[in-house]
Image (tube, rainbow, N blue to C red):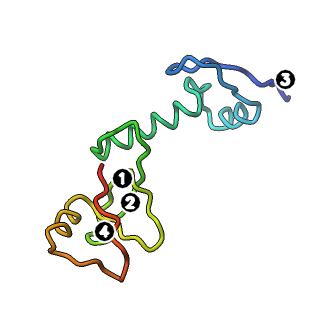
Amino acid sequence: MEENIEDKFLICKDCKRKFLFSIREQKQFGQKGWANPVRCKVCRRMKKILNLALEENVSISDEVQFSEVCDKCNRKFYTRIKRKTGINIYCDDCWEEIKRGDLNAENGKKDEGMAKS
């Protein structure tokens, strides 16, 4: 027997704004056995980012951060610089070596510089 489901508006626990809990989402949540969401999509996404940053011991700023891999040591790090084609990007440690002249640019790519976390 099919229930009469309609779109619902819920109040976000974090930002206190109204958000739509659509019929499609209600069905998905029901199939998975989940309770109704308590946060809007934006706040849910921010909570996931915060949890990931805390798990990986990464500082959080108000600026957008990108996950990158250092072109020298292959270490994963977060940066405000978005990678551009043909540009090397380095973690803080490798960039310090480059600034001291310990490493030359590899693969004929231009060096973007240090990617601050």
Q: Which amino acid does label 4 sit on?
A: Asn
Q: State the image coordinates of residue 72 (x, y, percent, origin top left).
A: 27, 72
Pick whichever of labels 1 and 2 is earlier in the sequence: 2
Disc 3 and disc 1: Cα gap in Å?
48 Å
Q: Distance between the residues labelled 3 and 2?
A: 47 Å
Q: Which amino acid does label 3 sit on?
A: Asn
Report which quarter residue 97 is drawn in.
bottom left
Distance, label 2 to label 4, CA atoms, is: 9 Å
User: Does residue 117 appear left or right of residue 35 in this picture?
Assistant: left
Going from N to C along the chain, the mark reached first, 1 or 4, is: 4
CA neighbours of label 4 inside 10 A, class few (<14), some (14 to 19), many (20+) = few
The secondary element bearing badge 4 is classed as: loop
- Mark 3 touching mark 1, by CB under 8 A? no
What residue does disc 3 label?
A: 4
The reply, left or right, for residue 35 in relation to residue 74 is: right
Q: Which amino acid does label 2 sit on?
A: Glu
Sequence order check, earlier mark of 3 and 1? 3
Measured along the vertical axis of the image, is residue 10 above or below residue 67? above
Rate crowding at label 3 as few (under 14), some (14 to 19) or many (20 or more) other CA atoms within 10 Å. few
Image vertical order of residue 45 relative to residue 106, above or below:
above
Q: How far apart are marks 1 and 4 (CA)?
A: 14 Å
Discs 3, 4 touching: Cβ within 8 Å: no
Mark 2, residue position: 68
Label of residue 79 in the image: 1
Image quarter of the N terminus = top right
Image x and y of residue 70, in percent: 31, 66
Which is more foreground, mark 3 or mark 4?
4
- In the picture, residue 31 is in which quadrant? top right
Q: Distance between the residues labelled 3 and 4?
A: 53 Å
Residue 74: assigned label: 4
